[in-house]
Amino acid sequence: MKKSIALLSACVLFSSLVGCSAGTVTRAEQQDSSQISVVCTLFPEYDWTREILGDQVENVKLTYLLDNGLDLHNYQPSAKDMITISDCDLFIYIGGESESWVDDALKEVTNPNMKVIRLMDVLSDSVKEEEIKEGMQIEEEDEEEEEEPEYDEHVWLSVRNAETLCDAICDTLCEIQPDQADAYQENLNHYLEKLSAMDASFSEMTEQFSIKTVIFGDRFPFRYLVDDYGIDYYAAFAGCSAETEASFETIAFLSQKLDELQIDTVFTIENADESIAKAIISSTEKKNQKIVSLNSMQSITKQQIAEGANYLTIMQNNFDVLRENLQ
Ligand SMILES: [Zn+2]
């Protein structure tokens, strides 16, 4: 009796081991062959994808190409980046002038099922032409090539655009992994609630101010943000112009605007050297304006991500800076 029980247990044990190990191998194989690869050029695309994937992010190879701190306008893919792009399942990019390298990269694609999201296509008519405002330093090139409109590629800086773009990313992820669609949709809905709450706080906050004008002693990638909330702006350069030197006329125009509107703050973008902002301030009557910066997320590093950077916290920080400095 004892013997047969022992034998039976051994059998059960043996079959459960075999069953279990066979099951593990199958699951591992399935996971490996079904593991998808998603490649994003800019930080917000990466962060939104991460939010939509939720727990599944561990089973997805998610690549953010600009993680070494190069900014959007200076990045060119390395040979290794080209290989990562060529066989990914989903490639997400902005699609502006700074990413003209993408056309060539997509000619090298080896995965016939690759899906591509160009954010500027998703937004279609909401994409704005780059605006030249009074006082701006104009690139010589711009003056010559007036026929072809340049589009402002900094579309991610509108929280409202972010909602549309997250929707599109979620739809495509669900097409690629239909068995995860319910979970992705749920993560998306949760994230959209946060974006929508942030949009509402921006509207409410900006309504309290009367001058509602920002003066940038720098490039100006924030047009999508300020337009959403009726904030006016003046800046040394349009978009992310390659110009670095501001003329006497530009400096003088911006300092006169500070005097005329009695504005106490000059804005820059992240990592700015502040020299233009300082020159503007030194030409004003008061000469005591402060310099603050907004983060346009064009060069978020691996380290910042490790320290917890995400789209919502960075936009919240931009919100706080605006709340403190709008008048
Ligand atoms: Zn830019």
Image (spheres, grey):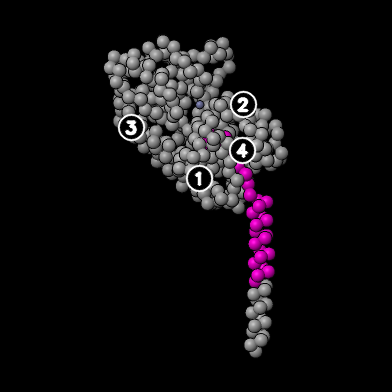
Q: Main secondary structure of the magenta part?
A: helix
- Residue at image mark 3: 323
**Between marks 4 and 2, how big is the CA–CA gap?**
15 Å
Q: How many marks?
A: 4
Which quarter of the rendered picture does the N terminus lie within? bottom right
Mark 1 is on which residue type? Glu
Q: Is residue 121 found left or right of 290 in the rendered image? A: right
| 240 up-or-down from 107: above or below | above
Q: Is residue 175 visible?
A: no
- Residue at image mark 1: 51
| 296 up-or-down from 242: above or below | below
- Circles 3, 2 touching at the beta carbon (< 8 Å): no
Tell me the SS state at disc 2: loop
Mark 4 is on which residue type? Phe
Determine the residue positioned at 47% across, 15% down. Answer: 245
Determine the residue positioned at 61% across, 26% down. Answer: 100
Q: Callout 4: 10 Å neighbours few (<14), some, many (20+)?
A: many
Q: Which residues are magenta?
A: 16-45
Q: Callout 2: 10 Å neighbours few (<14), some, many (20+)?
A: few
Q: Is residue 17 found left or right of 151 in the rendered image? A: right
Determine the residue positioned at 67% across, 29% down. Answer: 104
Residue 111: where, in percent of width, then height? 70, 41
Mark 2 is on which residue type? Ser
Give 70 or 148, whichever is nearer the viewer: 70
Q: Which mark is first along the chain, 3 or 4?
A: 4
Q: Is residue 305 visible?
A: yes
**Between marks 3 and 1, how big is the CA–CA gap?**
27 Å
- Residue at image mark 4: 91
Tell me the SS state at disc 4: strand
Q: Which mark is first along the chain, 2 or 3?
A: 2
